[in-house]
Amino acid sequence: MSEDRPATGPRQRIERLGAAALDGLAATGQLAGMLGATWRGVVRGRRPPGEVANQMFVVGNKSLLFVAVTLGFIGMVMVYQSCLQLERITGDLSRIGPEFLKLLVQDFGPTITALMLATRVGAGIAAEIGSMVVTEQVDALRMSGVTPIDYLIAPRFIACVVMGAVLTVFGVAIAYLAGGLTAWSSFDLNPRLFFDPSRVGFLDLCLGLTKTLCYGMAIPVISGACGLRARGGSEGVGAATTAAVIGSSLAVIALDLVISGVGLLLVGHGR
């Protein structure tokens, strides 16, 4: 007599795929609701005095060295590899600096900075809020008539948006400077040729700023949502932290793709 085996036919595969799609839509809807609630919390302003400034220090000042080192090394590597390849093909390195700055402003500066914040700040937000959930501090806030989103997520939301933009500007400057020094020291490229901002236009700045603001909004909302869903003690906090880092990083990459696609239609291929 044959043993019963779980069905693995096309119908079951379609059902699993549909269930996964529905779960994804539900999660997206929850994040959209969280974003709306966070904006309402920002407008209402019901948060502890000085909490926004404190979170700006945590997000901005404590991430400054991390972002500077990362963007600096990336700038050095990118310029070195680009100069090396162009020297072998054409020997003309005069356009390296302007094109590198345009790439930094449009894409690499905001995206790499956001990925760094997703790993550091996103994990911190999820761990802090998750610890408050498992120790029932969030329940105590609700019993006191305080909305957890207004108290916990809104200040971090403001800090991530503002300091994310500041860190992006700082990171772009560091990467550009490090790339210029690399081109000058390794390939004897005239700094006047490298430090040429003529290729960066208004639409490039708008595209980079749009990415920066969207990343700054996505990271605290996703990380805060993961923290509020933490359950089961320290293991739950660890799982929430991991989910926050993964979710924030994927959100940054997905937003980069969408905004770049829209920006490509506006800015065009030829600029």
Image: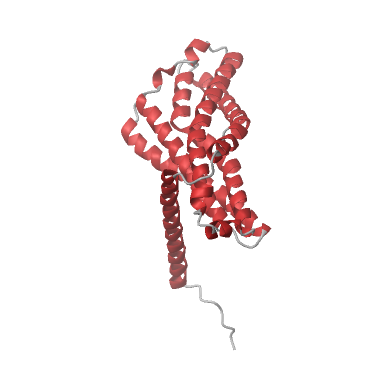
Q: Residue at x 32, y 36 (%)?
A: 265
Total marks shown come to 0
Give the camera-side residue of 213 and 201. 213
Q: Position of residue 154 (x, y in %)?
A: 49, 45
Q: Residue at x 53, y 19 (%)?
A: 87
Q: Position of residue 55 (x, y in %)?
A: 56, 39
Residue 264 placement, left or right of 173: left
Picture quarter with the N terminus: bottom right
Give the camera-side residue of 141 and 220. 141
Q: Residue at x 34, y 30 (%)?
A: 267
Q: How has the structure been colored for display?
A: secondary structure
Give the camera-side residue of 221 and 149. 149
Residue 14 placement, left or right of 230: left
Residue 136 placement, left or right of 37: right
Q: Position of residue 57 (x, y in %)?
A: 58, 34
Res 29 seen here? yes
Q: Residue at x 42, y 46 (%)?
A: 44
In the displayed structure, 114 sits above or below 18; it is: above
Q: Farthest residue in the front direction?
A: 144
